[in-house]
Structures are given as C-alpha cells and as structure tokens.
Image (cartoon, rainbow, N blue to C red):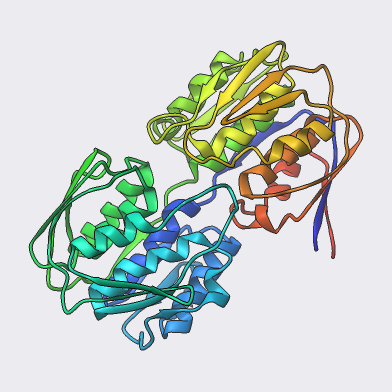
Amino acid sequence: MEKLLIKGGNRLSGSISCSGAKNAALPMIAATILSDEDITLRNLPYLQDITTMFELLGSMGAKITLDESMNFIISSSSIHDTEARYELVKTMRASILVLGPLVARFGKAKIALPGGCAIGSRPVNFHLDALEKLGAKISLENGYIEATSSRLKGADINFDGITVTGTENIMMAACLAEGRTRLTNVAREPEIEDLADLLNLMGAKVQGAGTDEIIIDGVESLKGTSYDIPADRIEAGTYLVAAAVTQGDIKINGISSERLISVIDRLQDAGADIELGIDSIKLSMNKIPTPVDITTAPFPGFPTDMQAQFSVLNAISSGKSSINETVFENRFMHVQELNRMGCNILVSGNTANFVGVSKLSGAPVMATDLRASASLILAGLCAEGETVVDRIYHIDRGYERIEEKLNYLGADITRLPN
C-alpha cells in the first residue's frame, strides 16, 4: 500500500491551476446514460473515482474513448446490462447516481448498495422514496436495490433532508419522465447547477438549479453534446489552507471565487490576505492563524468537505476555537491522528474544540477518508520532522497528483511504493 513521506517546514509559494471537479464530473458521467448519442466531457480529473465510474459504465456495455485532445467521449447506445455489481460499487458511494438514469431510460436497474468513505450515515432512502413517487417499483434484496418502471411519471417531491446525490439522481430521472416534476428542499451546491447545464444542453428542460426548488419538464429523449468540467472548489480550498498553515503565498488559477465565498471569508478571519481575480484566487499569510469558529452546512454554508483542512488551521492557531459538524455524524476521525502529531483537539458529540499549539511533530499517521487524508498532509507540511501518511488510496480518489502540485509550490513530499 503506497504512502506519502512529507518533510515539513517548507513555506508554500507559487502558482498552480485547479483540476476538474470530481463532484461535478461523477454525476455528469452518470447522465450520459440518459442518451443514446455521444457525450464529450472535457477537463475530467485523473482520479480513482472517475476510473471506477468509467469501469462501471463499461461493465454495462458503454464505450469510453479518449480523443487526441484528452477529452473523453462516452457512448451509452451500446448499454445492454443495467446491473451495477458490488465489485465496482463497493468503493464509491457516487455509484448510486446511475440508478435514476438507468430506470428512466431502460425501465429497470439493479444496483448494489454503495460503499465509499466511512464518514457517517448517508442513507439512500431519499433516492428510493423519490423514485417511488415517480412511479418506480423498488425492492431491496441481498444487498441490491432493484427498480423497475414502464415509464416514470412527473410528481411533486419534497426531500425530507437536503441530499446532493439524491437531488442529482432524481433530477436526472425526471428528465425522461412523463410530465412535470417539482423538487423542493433540494441541494443548492454549484455541482447541481453544472449538472443542470449539461442536461439542458442535452435537450432536457430543467429550471431552478441552484435554488431550493427545481422544476423539470420531461422529454421523450436526450441528445449528445459536449461539456467542460468546472474547476474543483474543494481542491482549491485545500491548497489555500495549505498556504495559510505554512504562512505561504500562492495563486490558484482557473477557479471562480463565487464557489468559495464561505471558505474565503473564514480564511480572511484567520488573518490571510486574499486577492480575487476573474478566475483566480491569491492568498498571502505572514502570521500565525487567528482561530476561527465554524459550523458546517449545505451550500452556500461552510462545506463539510473543508472541515478537516480547517481543523489543521485551528490546531496551530493562536487560541481556542471550535468546529461544529452538522452534515455528517462521524467526520472527526482525523482528530485522533492529528493529536498524535501534537494537536490539542477534544471532540464532544458533533463538535471539535481546539486549543492552538505552537508546533506539530511529524509522525506516522493513517488516513481514514478522503478529506481526512488531506488534513494529515496539511499537518505534515507545517510539522517539524517527517510525517508518513498511510492508506493514501483515499487521497487518490479525490485529488489529482496532489504531491506533484504541492511539490511545485515548494513542499517536500515523496510517494513511497507498496
């Protein structure tokens, strides 16, 4: 199992560009199932989750090719199997996103209950309840979801809780349903808007993405198109925090600041100087961070996917602070590993309380999930001595060439072989 060896103490500086957003790319790949014409996706990040999604579609019969410009062309006209098997689904929760498109286009789907990061309960009942309201028949047996429908029919659906993948799944399914579907209490993440943009280019009729109500008028079929995957806002936020904790000076190109307002606000509260360009963010930090209190929330609130990174910032800050996690109930598993490096963090329920320390010490640590992996790398960057991060397959699920980008900014990180 590969590891990362980090020699801490280097100040980050320089300029890098963002990769495409994994959380936008995965539902878009699933959306290609809705059409029997080719869909071209540009700026896809090279990540394990993307590879897994391609393998999943390929196992169903879809054809994926790479053109001379490194764009992916996905043809779902040859899909002949509507089963998503456990061997592929077990590592990635986003595989549930193929459920809605398969039922909408083929009238049936058999999907293994998905796996992914163990960061708390992320039930699929929101997806299943909504599909039933669209007219699908659902059964659960032997670890598989089976759904059938002659043709889905539009309905009014109010989600009991805000769910990003649930919103995406039902939005895709409703595109081929008969009549109008109204979705309320939906997620408002930018990736929802990106998916709606792609669907509309394919000929769907989706209105209201980015608000708490989405209206979809079903159509008979969807056509082929091409689309550029937007920059990854969580990757950008991670590198901004990396610069802040190393008292660095970096510029990130290709990212809209509108998608990171809550993160930028907290970084400024921590003492960072930030300059916003049309499609760039520049951060300079020349002092110990000021502690910041944070409560995670669905967009436009502070993203839960940035909580672990800010845990490192608060851990080395000049005072006391707290982070209240309201999205997932088991997302402080990185705290135990950070404390092994000298942090002073106490978790009580869904709140982590921090007392800033003057230094961290390198240590062997183990990643427990994707964003926890990022936090351990950030801690290693500002720690004295060497840090070895084990189980980095988590980080490869969501960050493209993270050690290469950080090394370009001045870090000293080596990927160790198995």
Q: Which quarter of the figure is the C terminus placed in?
A: bottom right
- Look at the picture and state if 237 lies above or below 150: above
For image coordinates 28% across by 44% down, the residue present is 186
- Look at the picture and state if 412 lies above or below 272: below
Give the percent coordinates (x, y) of residue 135: 17, 68
For image coordinates 56% across by 59% down, the residue present is 116
Give the percent coordinates (x, y) of residue 314: 67, 22
On screen, residue 37 versus residue 69, left or right, reads left
Residue 64 in which image quadrant: bottom left
On screen, residue 276 versus residue 269, left or right, reads left
Instruction: Check the image and name the residue furthest to the right.
Output: 385
Q: Which quarter of the figure is the N terminus placed in?
A: bottom right
On screen, residue 382 versus residue 27, left or right, reads right
Residue 313 in which image quadrant: top right
Q: 251 or 201: nearer the eye?
A: 201
- Look at the picture and state if 349 lies above or below 49: above
Give the percent coordinates (x, y) of residue 122: 47, 51
Q: How many marks?
A: 0
The answer to whether residue 64 shows anywhere in this view is no
Residue 291 in which image quadrant: top right
For image coordinates 47% across by 57% down, the residue present is 43
Q: 339 or 143: nearer the eye?
A: 143
For image coordinates 73% across by 48% down, the residue present is 367
Q: 140 or 172: nearer the eye?
A: 140
